[in-house]
């Protein structure tokens, strides 16, 4: 389940983090020009104009006819955040208030439909 920045550089896609006029790219395997920041995590910092594409990717779905963002997965459950904007609907689904106007809950993965990555 993806929820974060993604950059395309030299024909490959990487998890990324924009930082002003620079972009940090991340990968799990060592490679020339990449710095290990901890085991299994390597970074390369590039000027933003060297990156072919930068976008925000997140996983979305539908549960019980309502739109959600997928935040996490645990075994056969998905942690969802309601994006429909109607608190009575959120409450009727048994979602927990996480913050003002933000409702989240766990749903069985088998009940979720239209699971897909959305790029914004």
Image (cartoon, grey):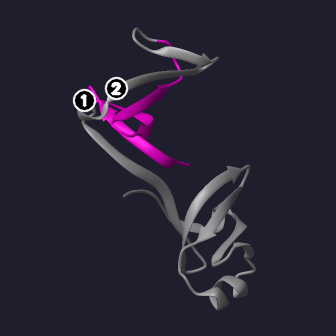
Looking at the rendered structure, the number of numbered marks drawn on it comes to: 2
Callout 2–callout 1 Cβ contact below 8 Å = yes
Residue 88 position, x and y percent, is 66, 91
Q: CA distance from mark 2 to mark 1?
A: 7 Å
SS category of the residue bearing label 1: helix
Residue identifier under label 1 = 50
The range drawn in magenta is 1-30
Q: Is residue 83 left or right of residue 23?
A: right
Residue 44 position, x and y percent, is 42, 22
Whether residue 64 is situated above or below residue 46 in the rendered picture = below
Q: Given the current orientation, which residue lies at the most extreme front position? A: 20
Residue 64 position, x and y percent, is 61, 79
Residue identifier under label 2 = 46
Q: Identify the image quadrant of residue 96.
A: bottom right
Residue at 31 percent across and 35 percent down: it is 8
Magenta span includes 28: yes
Whether residue 21 is situated above or below residue 39 in the rendered picture = below
Q: Given the current orientation, which residue lies at the most extreme bottom position? A: 88
Magenta span includes 73: no
């Amino acid at each position: 389940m993806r929820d974060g920045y993604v950059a395309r550089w030299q024909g490959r896609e990487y998890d990324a983090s924009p930082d002003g006029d620079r972009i940090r790219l991340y990968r799990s395997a060592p490679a020339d020009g990449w710095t290990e920041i901890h085991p299994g995590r390597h970074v390369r910092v590039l000027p933003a104009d060297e990156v072919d594409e930068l976008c925000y990717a997140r996983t979305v779905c539908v549960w019980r006819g309502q739109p959600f963002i997928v935040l996490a997965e645990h075994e056969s459950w998905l942690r969802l955040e309601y994006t429909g904007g109607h608190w009575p609907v959120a409450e009727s689904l048994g979602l927990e208030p996480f913050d003002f106007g933000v409702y989240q809950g766990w749903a069985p993965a088998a009940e979720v439909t239209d699971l897909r990555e959305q790029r914004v």
